[in-house]
């Protein structure tokens, strides 16, 4: 899994109007979409990645920088929530993987 940090993408430009002034002020701290893509690319392509690892930017507050191994929040380790998400995903996509 991975997160892009603060990345200047279309997602940021299409936030609700009330939030847009804040993103305008914070924009200098965002990185480009190319750098924001690195954690996802590393998680998907690095042959040394292990299941359950989480990647994000290596800079201050994980907001910008190169992809590195980071910690996920406590909620991401909730096995019951993981099972519910898997079940709902299978139901919504009509794709079932035997696990």
Image (cartoon, rainbow, N blue to C red):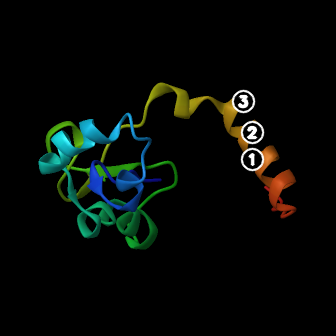
Residue ID at (20%, 59%): 66
Residue 57 horizontal side relative to residue 43, left or right: left
Q: Which residue is mark 1?
A: 86
Q: Residues within 10 Å of mark 2 (few under 14, many from 20)?
A: few
Earlier in the chain: of badge 1 and badge 3, it is 3
Q: Real-space Cα distance between discs 1 and 3?
A: 10 Å
Q: Which mark is residue 19?
A: none
Q: From the top left corner, tell me how far across and down residue 82 is, in percent.
A: 67, 38
Q: Is 87 in front, or is 25?
A: 25
Q: Real-space Cα distance between discs 1 and 2?
A: 5 Å
Q: Which residue is mark 2?
A: 83
Q: Residues within 10 Å of mark 1 (few under 14, many from 20)?
A: few
Q: From the top left corner, tell me how far across and down residue 84 is, in percent.
A: 76, 37
Q: Are marks 2 and 3 in contact (CB under 8 Å)?
A: yes
Q: Which mark is residue 80?
A: 3
- Asked which quadrant contains residue 23, the reply is top left
Q: Is 78 in front, or is 94?
A: 94
Q: From the top left corner, tell me how far across and down residue 18 is, in percent.
A: 38, 34
Q: From the top left corner, tell me how far across and down residue 30 is, in percent.
A: 20, 51
Judged from the image, the secondary structure of the residue bearing numbered disc 2 is: helix
Q: Is 25 in front, or is 79?
A: 25
Residue ID at (41%, 48%): 54
Q: Quadrant of the C terminus?
A: bottom right
Residue 95 horizontal side relative to residue 52, left or right: right
Residue ID at (45%, 68%): 44
Residue ID at (14%, 46%): 29
Judged from the image, the secondary structure of the residue bearing numbered disc 1 is: helix
Above or below, 81 against 14 in this view is above
Judged from the image, the secondary structure of the residue bearing numbered disc 3 is: helix
Residue 9 horizontal side relative to residue 26, left or right: right
- Asked which quadrant contains residue 77, the reply is top right
Q: Are marks 1 and 2 in contact (CB under 8 Å)?
A: yes
């Amino acid at each position: 899994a991975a997160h892009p940090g603060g990345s200047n993408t279309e997602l940021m430009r299409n936030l609700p109007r009330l939030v847009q002034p804040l993103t305008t002020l914070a924009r200098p701290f965002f990185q480009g979409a190319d750098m924001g893509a690195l954690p996802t690319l590393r998680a998907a392509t690095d042959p040394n990645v292990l299941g359950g690892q989480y990647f994000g930017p290596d800079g201050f507050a994980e907001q910008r920088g190169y992809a590195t191994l980071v910690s996920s929040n406590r909620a991401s380790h909730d096995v019951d929530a993981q099972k519910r998400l898997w079940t709902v995903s299978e139901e919504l996509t009509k794709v079932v993987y035997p696990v």
